Amino acid sequence: MRDVLVSNYYHYFQTNGRVVPHMFLMTFDALLGKGWFNVFNAVLFGAYLHLLTLNFVKERKNALMGLAISASLTLCFMCGFTNEFLWMSGVFNYEFVAVLVLLFNYLLNQEIRSKWWMPFLFLYGVVSGWTHEAVVIGLSCVYLWMCARKWQQLTLSQWVLLSGFVVGVALCVLSPGSIYRALGGDEASVAITGKMLNYVRALFYMYNLRIFFLMLLMWMLVKKMEKTWLIGALVSLLFVAFTGHDSGHSRFGVEMFSLIIVLCVFPYGKMKGWIAYAVLSFATVYLLLCMPYCVQNYQEFKRVERQIMETRDGIISTNEVHPPFYAERMVRRFMFSDTTDSYFIWGLYDDWFRTSVARYYGRKDVILYFLPEKFVQGTHSGIVDDDFDINTTLPFYVCRWSAVDVPTSLTYILRKSPWASYPILGGIERFAAEKMSIDKWMTLDIEGTTYLLAKKNFMIQDRVIDIKYE
């Protein structure tokens, strides 16, 4: 437990201010383990759905419909679902945070008169605010708007809760780690053009919002909008654009506020009772269809775990599960997908990831290397050539390497892109270049044979015709 507290202390000053979710995350990761986490996460998801319905579906007779909407939209449409509801780190940074703030909102709307509860309410307000800036900044604007409209009607318990919440938000957003991160960390001096490109990219990737656009469509259909919670969605949207993040899970705050709006304005009175059962049945069938791939993925995870515990040479073979498109969001892999360059970077090239995994499993005596099973089998059967196979389906290019020294440079030789003849596009290196330097490569010894592995650039892989090295 001492290590958890010390880690949180350094995390607060160096990375970000999400002390509460990271305290729980580190406790489960270091002390309780994955098994207890899975049980906790199942209960947490139920609490998430229940609190959404409890907070924003006003009439009890509509509760089942509200549950159906919450479950189906979250399971089938929430962008970044895998990283928010399955991945341990993401669960505590997003799903867990959602449960805390939804419970806070529920307490805020209850009439609590006993003064004995006030210290606990203040403390819970601090806990709820000290969670995740992508959620609490938008939520702060929602409550600020509410207070501006009804400040004379606020009860003592509401003032206490909101006061604690403000303290928690300040501790989260104004932490040294959060400020450092907001300024760009070690890249705080990056040129303004680079920053602008990040903002443009973040705005472009807003297309991965789904519930947000469903909410806008419902607005047009029912001619009704919950303006208070719309403030939260828009503020969260601007915040994500300002940070320059383009991942699905970075939009969690926007999607959660959009889901709240859908629950508030949904025309329950016009819906037949059987529709709720139909929607829940659809969500159940969807989960049942995804289940076999989730089981396969779990079995692969356990197979990799056994290899880590038993390996002597550090070679870990992975056999990635490739589910159909509809089940992809339900599969959280142990390794990055072998259809991205992240597999090579984290599984082979980057020491931090491999060292951290080895230490987690108590294997300080070996250096781990994660390799696709088909490549490991290929090394046993001797099918890897002395020249790079440009058409390989592996997440990297590989050849046998007989020289003593590691090459000093590697270069892709490219065929000309058809887009290079177009105005403007012809001036972009990605389209116009006839060769391009490879930024990451390494040698690896397996059973007495040395192999040279080079990172694959998936943006230009269809144009690569050769690889030269010096």
Image (tube, helix red, strand yellow):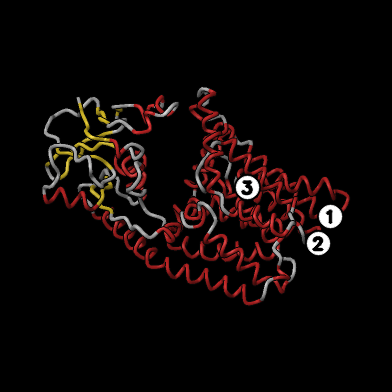
**Residue 55 seen from this side:** no
Count neighbours of disc 2 (C-alpha within 10 A) and say few if under 14, some if 14 to 19, many if 20 or more: few
Amino acid under disc 3:
Val
Q: Disc 2 marks which amino acid?
A: Glu
Taking the image as shown, residue 181 lies to the left or right of residue 300, namely: right
User: Residue at horizontal 23%, vertical 35%?
Assistant: 465
Reading the chain from its start, which is encountered first: label 2 or label 3?
A: 2
The C terminus - image quarter? top left
Q: x, y (%) of residue 118?
A: 77, 55
Do the residues under discs 2 and 3 have CB atoms within 8 angstroms?
A: no
Q: Which residue is mark 1?
A: 155
Tell me: 239 left or right of 287.
right
Spatial distance from mark 2 to mark 1, Cα to Cα? Answer: 8 Å
Q: Which residue is mark 2?
A: 111
Which label lies toward us, 1 or 3? Answer: 3
Q: Are marks 2 and 1 in contact (CB under 8 Å)?
A: yes
> Dot 1: what SS?
loop
Q: How many marks?
A: 3
Circle 3 is placed at which residue position? 135
Q: Position of residue 277 (x, y in %)?
A: 59, 75
Dot 2 falls on a residue whose secondary structure is: loop
The vertical placement of 464 against 368, above or below, is above
Q: Residue at x 53, y 73 (%)?
A: 281
Q: Is residue 188 above or below residue 8?
A: above
